[in-house]
Image: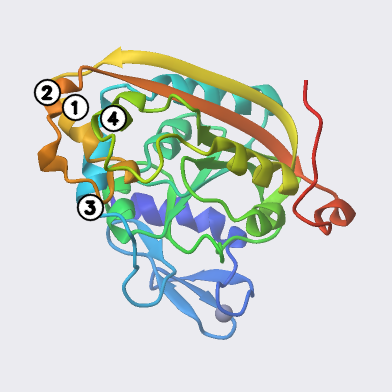
Amino acid sequence: MPSTAFEAFSPAKRMFRCPICKGKMSLSPKRSLVCKHGHCFDLSARGYVNFLAGAAKSRYSADLFANRRTILQAGFYDPVLDALHESIARRFPQGRVCVLDAGCGDGFYAKALSQEARMDVYALDNAKEAIQLACRGDTGVKWMVANLADIPLRDGTVDALLNILTPANYHEFARLQSERGILIKIVPGSRYLGQIRELAAGQLRSASYQDEATRSYFESHMRLLAEKELCYTRPVTPEQAEAFLRMTPMTFGVDLHSIHAARLREVTIHLHLLIGRRLTEKASGSSGTVKIAKT
Ligand SMILES: [Zn+2]
């Protein structure tokens, strides 16, 4: 496995940018990415590069990512993967496509997309626990522990940037987008995991998702090219119910022992895919109140 990971990084060395001095990087025989100033980041034996000095701090535990993996592997988010695949294929019908999953968690989407040979997939998360889970097996994905505010890739290199149910950094996203590049951001719809919200009612700070705020923030930084809505409800087993309760930041601060997981018999996945392209320099310099009329 380590040699495969090394091979995956080798042709990709031109893609990387030193997160400290912003210079080009090269791959040393010692399996490190090094810039001309000597800033050095080792490729771990497990097949990822850690660009964060010291311990990566994350709000999320390894337990959360493991539960999320249980749910993802059970197929609950397969329609989301299909929608991503379709959106990328429609914009890039042929040739190589450079994909970056920014905030990849356990790497479910990155891994699945990398199975298509023409997809050159990079994935980052600031949680080392997530990347260590993601990089298991022979994936061909370039895994990175890195900060969203300082993504270690060069300007204009990414064709399809994915940002799935996780915070965005639009300044970085705009910098990375290639000339034909798009951003696919997935945000929760009003009914997303509504059954869990009902079970935890009284313990949650807000009764529903504030998806309008996220959307207008998106539209103040990106030109909305297309939008797709997904909404479906699936039955869950008692084991899956437990995993669902423990996989979402929604239940942070909720006393999970007080919730009867057995009462969770189905879940609704309600999501919006927002597909955008960076605004022109002039437009993106304006304040965050740009409104784009939609039909
Ligand atoms: Zn450097």
Residue linked to disc 4: 196
Q: Look at the numbered disc 2 and give the secondary structure of its residue.
A: helix
* Residue behind label 3 places its C-beta within 8 angstroms of ligand 1: no
Q: Which mark is residue 262?
A: 2
Q: Callout 4, which amino acid?
A: Ile
Q: Callout 2, which amino acid?
A: Ala
Q: Look at the numbered disc 3 and give the secondary structure of its residue.
A: helix
Q: Is residue 196 left or right of residue 169?
A: left
Q: Position of residue 271 (x, y in %)?
A: 50, 27
Badge 1 or badge 4: first in the primary sequence:
4
Q: Position of residue 19 (x, y in %)?
A: 55, 72
Residue linked to disc 3: 62
Q: Are marks 1 and 2 in contact (CB under 8 Å)?
A: yes
* Label 1 CA crowd tier, 10 Å (few <14, some 14–19, many 20+): many
Quarter-of-image position of residue 57: bottom left
Q: Callout 1, which amino acid?
A: Ala
Give how far apart the Cα atoms at labels 1 and 4 are: 9 Å
Q: Is residue 10 left or right of residue 197?
A: right
